[in-house]
Image: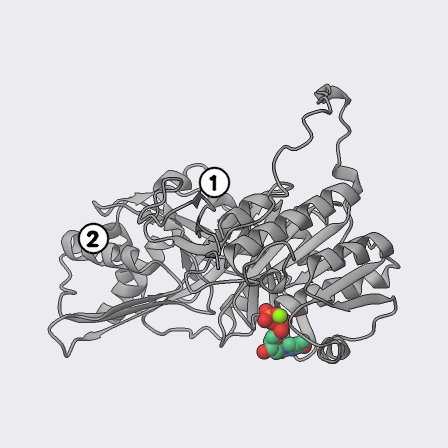
Amino acid sequence: MAKAKTVFFCKECGTESSKWLGQCPGCRQWDTFVEEPVIKKSSTGPSNRGISAQPVLLSEVKSETESRLSSGIGELDRVLGGGIVPGSLVLVGGDPGIGKSTLLLQTCREIVNKGKRVLYITGEESKGQIKMRAERLGAFSGELLLLCETNLDLIEDVANKHKPEIIVIDSIQTMFKEDIASAPGSVGQVREATGALMRLAKSTGITIFIIGHVTKEGMVAGPRVLEHMVDTVLYFEGDNYASYRVLRAVKNRFGSTNEIGVFEMQGSGLIEVKNPSEYMLNGRPEGEPGSVVSASIEGTRPILVEVQALTSRTNFNMPRRTAAGTDYNRVNLLMAVLEKRLGIQLGDCDAYVNVAGGMRITEPALDLAIVTAILSSFRNITIKSNTILFGEVGLTGEIRAVNMADQRVAEAAKMGFEICILPQANRGKIKAPEGIKLIGVKNIGEVMEYIKENR
Ligand code: TYD
Ligand code: MG
């Protein structure tokens, strides 16, 4: 019997090769090639050369902005850039159990309740399971079409027959196309299935939400090309132990990226969190060393977060350092700056840094808060609970300007903070809002002085 033909695909960028390669020539990543059966017919690519292509004038093309449909969930609309764009393909990725199915079922509920037609296709759960979830979420006054199916060719037929406005695919890893020999969830299948859904969305104007599982590395499982093919990529993330969830846009052809929506998982589904700062600062210890508040920008929105640090004498040869919710290497670097610039001996200290609430923030504006929290814990100095600080810390210990400082200050003032320590370079350009005093600082020495005098 003839041996089945196989090809090799790069998991990252989808590059194809007839033999295994250590390094992908496409994206230069190592060890990303996986073997898969050959795809018999490629349905992508130019096939209709006979039809002549006609360019059009840009000025004659109609803009599509007006036709957005509200999802009925404000935080989702915000992340999508102001509502659902007809005919778009939206990928929603996230860890198992984070609430992807819940979020989309809730969206379906809002949309069917407006009298629109929605088709929810699941390859993972039974109709009964979906019904149980729907009952937790509350009343469906409209009609939602459910389909338990994984064969994409059949799904296309159903979509063409019922002509819904929105389709939800739960999840792309369970879908398969018959003409591809490999198993569902494999690189080839995921790629072809997404391609088929893209053609369906673009040819019919149906908006398709695709749920995708996330691998250990935090990517949507399957080739990176998946992210290139769709219009919008949303990640749903959050701490398994905290009830809040963040929906983040990492790619959006119809709006700004890095916009976030905040939700809280409750017994009756996801509830929008309209004021995330208040939520994040809830339960903050006041008058304890090692706890400071900083202002971070997520997308276009300022969010106040609490940064905590704990230093203690190490019992090992190598001090332990951990960073939860922020960049580990950045914390090490900031500790080195503290040692060198302020002469603080942290070499025999374990240090733990945590952004409370389970939020993950990597922007450098948090530097000053991290440094101050470590100092505060090490020296046992409390930072007053009416004080907030932000700024980037450079290698020489200088405090560098950050973007959108005025919005951070405005949010701090809104949340009732009275003192804001910020980079001197930003201080000059901002008028202090009512009730908050701005203190510009140039280096970490000045910050140290200030907190010692105002403990
Ligand atoms: P689910 O949407 O099934 O996650 P995913 O599709 O991302 O795998 O949500 C799973 C979790 O959410 C589950 O552990 C139960 C919890 N949950 C609630 O707390 N409240 C609710 O109302 C619902 C529907 C789920
Ligand atoms: Mg699910």
Would you say the beta carbon of the disc 2 residue lies within 8 angstroms of ligand 1? no
Looking at the rendered image, the disc whose residue lies closer to the viewer, 2 or 1, is 2
For residue 301, side relative to residue 124 (left or right): left
Give yes or no for contact between labels 2 and 1 (Cβ–Cβ under 8 Å): no
Foreground pick, 405 / 326:
326
Q: Quadrant of residue 317?
A: bottom left
Q: Residue at x 25, y 51 (%)?
A: 444
Lateral position of residue 32 relative to residue 215, left or right: left
Q: Residue at x 43, y 55 (%)?
A: 35
Label total for image: 2
Q: Position of residue 36 (x, y in %)?
A: 47, 56
Q: Which residue is mark 1?
A: 430
Q: CA distance from mark 2 to mark 1?
A: 28 Å
Q: Residue at x 65, y 33 (%)?
A: 47
Give left or right: position of 202 versus 179: right
Q: Amino acid at mark 2?
A: Val
> Which label is found at residue 337?
2
Residue at point 75%, 59% (across, down): 154
> In the picture shown, does residue 96 fall above or below 112?
below
The three-letter amino acid code for the residue at tag 1 is: Ile
Say which element carries label 1: loop
Residue lying farthest to the left in this orientation: 317
Q: Could one spot residue 405 in this view of the protein?
A: yes
Q: Horizontal and vertical percent for residue 205? A: 78, 44
